[in-house]
Image (cartoon, rainbow, N blue to C red):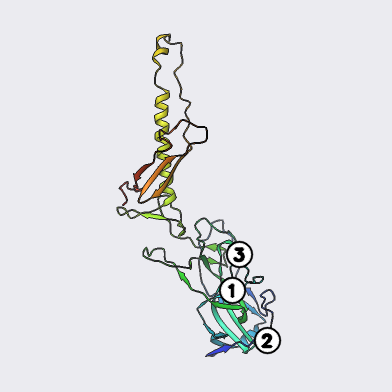
Amino acid sequence: MNEDTSSASIKSNNRRLELETPKFTIKINLPKQPRSKKKRKAHFELDIIDKLIIEPRAEWNMMKEYSIFKHGEIAFERGEIVEVKRPGNDGTPGERKEWLAKVLEVKADSPHCVYVRVAWFYWPEDLPMGRMEYHGRNEAIESNHPDIIDAMTVNSKVDIKEWDEEDEEATFNGYYYRQQYDYLSGQLTAPREFCICERYYNPDTRIVNCPGCNIWMHEECIIANAVKRHKKSSLTAKIGDDLKPDPLAEKGRKKGRDKPKKSTSKPDQNVAAVLFDGKIRIKEIIKKGDDDSDSGLDADTIIDEDIRCLKCGIVVP
């Protein structure tokens, strides 16, 4: 089929802008895969047109193909990412985000009938596995979930950036994506692993780079390590105090009759830490009515320590 490089313009005919009753339906034609207990690694192919059965097929094939379509004064091109009106949204503050999709193909048989074949993006909460702890508030997920929509449901173009996590100088504002969801297998590609914990990075949180071994560390891992160290040192100190011999008791003690003294100390659970001005700031939170400081930190005392790499141990400036 020859492609028309001109644009398809849309004229309003007061049609209902709903996606629930599409004119065209898509079925995926895939050969049966042999059963395997081994989990398949996500393989992502954006345009899966060769695996699609579009009905009614004859009507779809007869329509003229375009590289651009216009909605009002805005021209949309193939390959662009667009915002699609979500049914039920009426502009009320706090409603669900509109849908995002990549334009793959544009077809029309008249100015009133312009259709766009798209691949949907997902918001993390719309994924089958749900939102993960590493998903940021402006994060979307690219997918090859196919659909054909009425061009009148397209609201606008979307400024969204692909985030290459290997590019440590990358900066972006607004929407971004780094993962792909394969609609055929139900698999999600894995982001880059960070820190000694080998977990992923939520860009709404902070990570710290070690100039020595070049590892990136999660802020929460640095804080957890500091709290753990202070709990351990405070417990060691208290156990030492508990096990000190009592001089008065020693005088009346008969050899072999008394059992060795055991410590009843428990780890202090009220040590808190935060990264502040290039340091780890540590203090003890005293409960109401608790006059003693189990950790040895006074309630009004703040300890600032250097941030040290969790892997190589050097001071991180």
Q: Amino acid at mark 1?
A: Pro
Q: Is residue 297 left or right of residue 110?
A: left
Kindly state the secondary structure of the residue where label 2 is placed.
loop
Q: What's the CA distance linking mark 1 and mark 3? A: 28 Å
State which tag comes first along the sequence, 3 or 2.
2
Q: Is residue 261 above or below residue 111?
A: above
Kindly state the secondary structure of the residue where label 3 is placed.
loop
Between 24 and 21, the one nearer to me in the picture: 21
Reading the image, the residue beneath label 3 is 94
State which tag comes first along the sequence, 1 or 3.
3
Q: Is residue 59 above or below residue 19?
A: below
Q: Is residue 197 left or right of residue 104?
A: left
Which of the 4 quarters of the picture holds residue 225? top left
Q: Which mark is residue 146?
A: 1
Crowdedness near tag 3: few (<14), some (14–19) or many (≥20) residues, C-alpha within 10 Å: few
State which tag comes first along the sequence, 1 or 2.
2
Q: Amino acid at mark 2?
A: Asn
Reading the image, the residue beneath label 2 is 13
Which of the 4 quarters of the picture holds residue 125? bottom right
